[in-house]
Amino acid sequence: MLLSVLSWLCSSLLLPLLTVSGGKLPEAEVTIEVLHRPFICHRKSKYGDILLVHHEGYFENGTMFHTSRTEGDKHAVWFTLGIREVIKGWDKGLQDMCSGEKRKLIVPPALAYGKEGKGKIPPESTLTFIIEVLEIRNGPRSHESFQEMDLNDDWKLSKSEVKEYLRKEFERHGYPPNDTLHENMVADIFAKEDENKDGFISSREFTYKHDEL
């Protein structure tokens, strides 16, 4: 929910190649139905973009198991598309969407919660989602994001700059400041992203994975 920096804490996972007698098994697919698309579309979603969505989830029998509009904090959800922050079915089914577009996704178990299930989701469940994209933003690895964080324009990010960015993002979305949480997040970010361990995240370290998202 906290936009771009949170997605740094997630890494892309390679999908294993399943083979039988030397040939690939057919991949499961998401069934996509466009329920509404705005007449004007300024940009379409792609892997690496950050999406703000409202969603409803249904079992095959039509029973709703979740809605972001009335459950939890009743807020729409932020996530980064294509890096497995959400189920695979969403990553596949929410590409090329416009802000304001609404889709119905029918997601097979292999692209949802599989053989294990999760919480109230039984194993091997085919799920239906109604998802509305409210906003699309540049992804966490964009040069625009780096420049926004690089307060002194020295082409590297210090821990204080990253912490300040986190503080502003929390404030922008109505969350109270939390220095302890911010410091823990900064420590995790630098542990993963500061490749040469010099205490800074360079523009190369920040952006070099951009095309993989």
Image: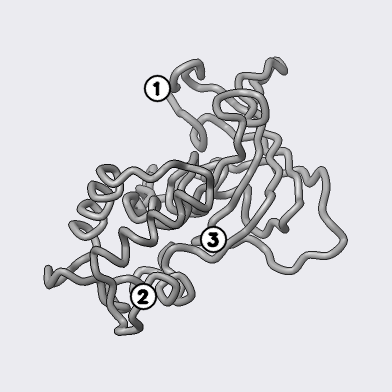
Give the spatial CA distance, label 2 vs label 1: 43 Å
Amino acid type, residue under disc 1 in the picture: Glu
Display coloring: one colour
From the image, tell me which residue sits under label 1. 116
- Label of residue 150 in the image: 2
Amino acid type, residue under disc 3 in the picture: Asp
Which residue sits at x=61%, y=30%? 74
Where residue 106 sits, quadrant-wise, is top right
In the drawing, does residue 186 fall left or right of residue 137? left
In the drawing, does residue 129 fall left or right of residue 22? right
Check whether the beta carbons of the residues at disc 1 and disc 3 lie within 8 A of each other: no
Where residue 191 sits, quadrant-wise, is bottom left
Give the spatial CA distance, label 3 vs label 2: 20 Å
Quarter of the picture holding the C terminus: bottom left
Q: Earlier in the sequence, mark 2 or mark 1?
A: 1
Q: Earlier in the sequence, mark 3 or mark 2?
A: 3
In the drawing, does residue 202 fall left or right of residue 121? left
Check whether the beta carbons of the residues at disc 3 and disc 2 lie within 8 A of each other: no
